[in-house]
């Protein structure tokens, strides 16, 4: 570590000397009790700030000891405001002889991606359409109203109840995609407005927690398909994923379940149980454990509205059964859509790639169509969404050609496939990983 010139501030305090650091020094500070970040050649000590980070302490911890300007820009819609929080955390700068990127990243690729982002900003692709999101919210509310009107007029026969369940499932799935938009701050210019409406959509329309979603989902975006960093690939020993984890389990003779059959028991465990069981337990326990009382109040408002609406028709037990059935159906929809972009892709330990390369390795797209856009909440443009999380989804198709062109320039694989093939690839990927586990378990 060296020392350089004087660093003054606006507070009238005596100027302090600038400290210079090497990447090697910054990379050492990636511990739970010692976290530094590199952003645009400046070093920040975020150890104490991490616990107060609005997006959760884990997402910022996952980037500790790294060059993180692209992640920083990807998650914050008002960098100027966030810089005010960063300023007191500044500890120094990169030494003049140090490269701007760490770990031998391709500096030209990194710069070209940042130029692409600037081009997208100049094209106003980060500006949301109020009409699009108003209509989207409107069609969810219309389905909720139609569901109530239908049973009010036609009664609670089996056919009516089945249609009702399908309507409620559709409104819940679409509300899930809509809360995703507000959670990523992609609708309003002000973060505060996004947060308020996010709590309404995920809380009052779905009965879930905004803070639980934020803290979990942002980790996935920062480090997609990275073991011990992306919670979406933490399968609690129920599944083994990718090419390396199955071999590790096999060599250690770990057999929590017969993983060579995971592509078969997947159908009985993952799609039917994720939302009605695992997520429900996790959401409720998280709100209580971390005292997310505002989120809990919003969630209670959902359940009050639901039971006040349906108990007069189905009674308490019948309403509970209907809600469970709707969650069961929605869970299938959610699992197939969210896993098709990631499970068939590379899943491995941290490799410290640049932003573009890390996101491209972990994500793929599904072919565009009106139905695919609606059915997946535009997550068929998963690549563009992962590169630019705060971009309104109705603009993904506009930035897509620019992304494909940049990938072609640097030989980065851009994968796109039909919806049906994407579903089949989930099962095929699980079978491949299961076979790798069995081979290692028996022969290594």
Image (cartoon, rainbow, N blue to C red):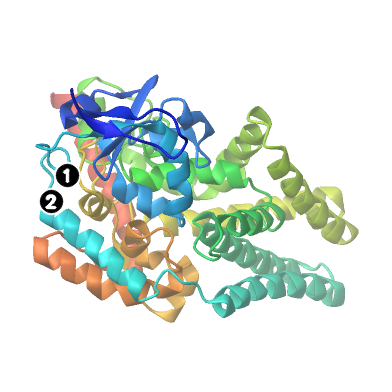
Residue 254 position by quadrant = top left
Q: Are marks 2 and 1 in contact (CB under 8 Å)?
A: yes
Q: Is residue 161 visible?
A: yes
Does residue 208 appear to the left or right of 391 in the view shown?
right
Q: How many marks?
A: 2
The image shows residue 85 at horizontal and vertical percentages of: 47, 40
Q: Is residue 119 above or below residue 217?
A: below
Q: Is residue 201 above or below residue 400?
A: above
The image shows residue 258 at horizontal and vertical percentages of: 34, 32
Q: Label 1: state its secondary structure.
A: loop
Q: Earlier in the sequence, mark 2 or mark 1?
A: 1
Q: Residues within 10 Å of mark 1 (few under 14, many from 20)?
A: some
Q: Which residue is mark 2?
A: 107
Q: Residue furthest right?
A: 312
Q: Which residue is mark 1?
A: 100
The image shows residue 66 at horizontal and vertical percentages of: 26, 36
- Of residues 251 and 91, the one drawn nearer to the viewer in this rendering: 91
Q: Residues within 10 Å of mark 2 (few under 14, many from 20)?
A: some
Q: State the quadrant of the N terminus.
A: top left
Q: Is residue 421 visible?
A: no
The image shows residue 383 at horizontal and vertical percentages of: 31, 61
Q: Label 2: state its secondary structure.
A: helix
- The disc at residue 331 is none
State the residue at coordinates (21%, 48%). 354
Q: State the quadrant of the C terminus.
A: top left
Observer-side mark, 2 or 1, equals 1
Does residue 164 appear to the left or right of 31 in the view shown?
right
How far apart marks 2 and 1 lie (CA) works out to 8 Å
């Amino acid at each position: 570590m060296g020392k350089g010139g004087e660093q003054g501030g606006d507070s009238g305090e005596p100027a302090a000397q600038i400290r210079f650091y090497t990447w090697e020094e910054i990379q050492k500070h990636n511990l739970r009790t010692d976290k530094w970040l590199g952003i645009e050649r400046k070093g920040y000590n975020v150890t104490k700030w991490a616990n107060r980070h609005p997006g959760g302490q884990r997402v910022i911890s996952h980037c500790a000891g790294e060059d993180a300007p692209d992640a920083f820009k990807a998650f914050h819609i008002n960098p100027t405001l966030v810089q005010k929080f960063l300023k007191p955390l500044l500890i120094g700068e990169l030494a003049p002889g140090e490269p701007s990127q760490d770990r031998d990243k391709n500096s030209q690729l990194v710069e070209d991606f940042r130029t692409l982002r600037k081009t997208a900003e100049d094209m106003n692709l980060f500006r949301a359409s109020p009409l699009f999101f108003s209509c989207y919210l409107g069609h969810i509310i219309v389905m909720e109203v139609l569901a109530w009107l239908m049973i009010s007029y036609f009664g609670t026969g089996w056919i009516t109840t089945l249609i009702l369940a399908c309507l409620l499932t559709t409104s819940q799935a679409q509300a899930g995609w809509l809360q995703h938009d507000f959670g990523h701050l992609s609708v309003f210019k002000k973060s505060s407005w996004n947060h308020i409406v996010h709590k309404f959509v995920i809380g009052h329309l779905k009965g879930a927690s905004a803070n639980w979603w934020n803290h979990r989902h942002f980790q996935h975006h920062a480090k997609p398909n990275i073991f011990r960093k992306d919670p979406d690939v933490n399968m609690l020993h129920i599944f083994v994923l990718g090419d390396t984890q199955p071999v590790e389990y096999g060599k250690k003779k770990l057999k929590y379940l017969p993983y060579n059959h995971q592509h078969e028991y997947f159908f009985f465990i993952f799609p039917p149980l994720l939302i009605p069981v695992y997520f429900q337990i996790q959401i409720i326990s998280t709100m209580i454990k971390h005292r997310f009382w505002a989120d809990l109040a919003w969630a209670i408002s959902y359940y009050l509205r639901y039971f006040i609406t349906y108990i007069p028709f189905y009674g308490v037990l019948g309403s509970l059964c209907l809600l469970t059935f709707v969650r069961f159906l929605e869970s299938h929809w959610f699992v197939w859509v969210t896993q098709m972009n990631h499970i068939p892709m590379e899943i491995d330990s941290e490799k410290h790639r640049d932003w573009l390369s890390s996101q491209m390795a972990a994500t793929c797209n599904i072919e565009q169509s009106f139905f695919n856009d609606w059915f997946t909440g535009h997550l068929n443009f998963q690549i563009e969404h992962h590169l630019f999380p705060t971009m309104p989804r109705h603009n993904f198709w506009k930035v897509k050609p620019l992304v494909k062109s940049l990938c072609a320039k640097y030989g980065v694989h851009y994968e796109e496939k039909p919806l049906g093939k994407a579903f089949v690839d989930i099962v095929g990927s699980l079978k491949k990983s299961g076979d790798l586990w069995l081979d290692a378990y028996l022969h290594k």
